Image (cartoon, rainbow, N blue to C red):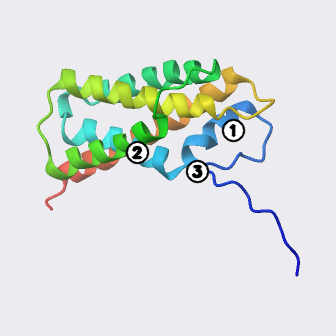
Amino acid sequence: MVLLPAQMASAHEDAPSPNSLEQGFLHPLLGIDHLAAMIAVGLLSAVLLGGAIWRLPLAFVAALLVGGIAGFNGLELVGTELWVMGSLVAMGAALMTRMTLRLGWALLAVAFFGFAHGNAHGLELPVAVNSTGYAAGFMLASTLCHVSGIALGVTVNRSRW
């Protein structure tokens, strides 16, 4: 019988490429928690805040960068992964109930969740990867996911169903 060491459980696998931009881009896409949250931000902005469609994604991405920089420097938000999970629950509940959101509160919540997601990305910076390229990658991927969520939300809003 051969015994093999078990791999440590991880929400994200490091991308095989040493390219900082590529690793940063793939990081939010490889973790279902991050991917779902990024799309949910776009959905929220399209479905619940039609007139402020770009404000939530911009707030999220700006806070994502700040949280990422904090993580790069070893500053960890207490309960980071719980806040990431909480963001999914909160945004999912808001979407399911079609909750009426005041723009200010929505921006504050989404910015905080963006900070938590960015902090998780920053804390998981792979060894030998440039933080600037990595941050550019996860911001680009997040923005594209937001745009996908917005497109889905606009399509749903226009649907007869």
Disc 1 marks which residue? 23
| Residue 52: percent from left, percent from top | 23, 26
Q: Which callout, 3 or 2, points at the residue further toward the start of the chain?
A: 3
Q: Quadrant of residue 138?
A: top right
**Along the line of sight, the residue nearer the viewer: 159 or 11:** 11
Residue that appears at 53% across and 28% down = 119
Q: Residues within 10 Å of mark 3 (few under 14, many from 20)?
A: few
Q: Is residue 65 above or below residue 45?
A: above
- Does residue 22 appear to the left or right of 3 in the view shown? left
| Residue 27: percent from left, percent from top | 61, 41
| Residue 55: percent from left, percent from top | 30, 24
Residue that appears at 62% across and 38% down = 25
- Does residue 141 appear to the left or right of 15 in the view shown? left
Q: Residue 11: which disc?
A: 3
- Regarding residue 150, the answer to whether it shows in the image is no
Find the distance from the CA under tag 3 to the CA under tag 2. 12 Å
Q: Which callout, 3 or 1, points at the residue further toward the start of the chain?
A: 3
Disc 2 marks which residue? 85
